[in-house]
Amino acid sequence: MPEGHSVHRLARRFDQLFVGRQVSASSPQGRFAGGATLIDGRWMTRAIAVGKHMFLEFDNDLWLHVHLGLYGAWDFAGDIHAEALSSPSGEETVVGEHEDSLSSIGAPRRARLRVSEDETLTGDSENFPAAPVGAVRVRLLTHSTVADLRGPTACDVLRAEEVQAKIDTLGPDPILDSGRKAENRFVASVMKRATPIGLLLMDQSVVAGIGNVYRAEILFRARLNPYTRGRDLDEKTVRALWKDWAKLLKIGVDTGQMLTRDNLGPNPARGPMARRANRHWVYHREGLPCRVCDFPIVMDVMGARKLYWCPQDQV
């Protein structure tokens, strides 16, 4: 499932390519025909992300709300800026202010870009707009750019008060609010509960945007046992979790990748992090030696999701 950094990058892409433009909306698949009619021909005025939810505002005070879930993804085509490319060798290339990449050219391209867990170039489009491919729930089209949505968990048109009601159910998001008030809210939510911290970090009402990868990595970075109850943690530890999430989320938004290991040199795109397998401490490393102590990484199931952790370091 795309985690918070991907959804923030997605909102930024809509802000760059669609906000301030008139948008034609349709539902090639037909399942969202009624909702598409409500926003068809309107001007997009704002794009925001809160955790894993994205909200696109139109000039008739209606919002398109999308949660990608496990299978959802947006495809872009037309005049777009490619922010992530595959290298000639096929290896993924990370980009952003922390990396040096040939793709960071800033020039408009005729391209097709898929935004899901990560962002990679998938091919060129000769005719614009091309006919929809597959089960496209929503197509948003300007004079120069098209975005196709497939397979979302949630896709609906909301009024402003309904958007606020949805946001009110979510925990704090450090991209939107990095201040003390948001941090205090997170700390209070964690420390009053008997729920294991490994579940609390995935609870979107406690903190918005953390998914399976960031959960495992944040807990390892804190050397924290995922089964420790929230109310058994000291305040300093919980505040450190918030600060580390804010740090990792910003890096993810900047680079488009979940980079959770530190001190890998000034150019990780050409160093240890050039391959996804090297970017994490414990995630997806079941049975492999811990990068710190060599003890085999364990995979448990917590909250119906796979949890990777080191029983020796995270005691």
Image (spheres, helix red, strand yellow):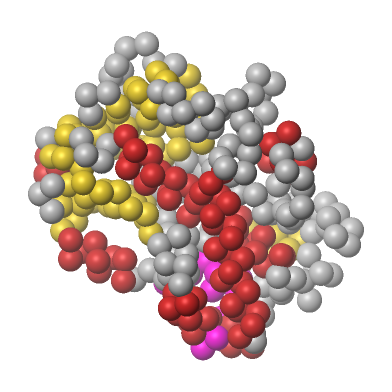
Residue at position x 12%, y 35% from top? Answer: 41
Q: Eyeballing the image, is 92 above or below 48? A: above
- Residue 168 appears at what percent x and percent y? 31, 71
Looking at the rendering, in which quadrant would you find the C terminus? Answer: bottom right
Which residue is nearer to you in this view: 21 or 41? 21
Q: Residue lying farthest top? A: 126
Q: Quadrant of residue 27?
A: top left
Residue at position x 27%, y 37% from top? Answer: 18
- Residue 32 appears at what percent x and percent y? 21, 41
Q: Eyeballing the image, is 315 above or below 153? A: below
- Whether residue 112 is visible here, answered yes or no, is no
- Residue 105 appears at what percent x and percent y? 51, 26
- What predominant SS class does the magenta segment belong to? loop
Which residue is nearer to you in this view: 270 or 312? 270
Residue at position x 69%, y 21% from top? Answer: 89
Q: Eyeballing the image, is 142 above or below 8? A: above
Q: Eyeballing the image, is 78 above or below 59? A: above
Left-right relation of 314 to 246: right
Q: How many marks?
A: 0
52 is within the stretch colored magenta = no
- Whether residue 99 is visible here, answered yes or no, is yes
- Residue 57 appears at what percent x and percent y? 22, 50
Which residue is nearer to you in this view: 219 or 57? 57
Left-right relation of 88 to 295: left
Q: Quadrant of residue 238?
A: bottom right
Residue at position x 67%, y 72% from top? Answer: 226
Residues drawn in magenta: 191-205
204 is within the stretch colored magenta = yes
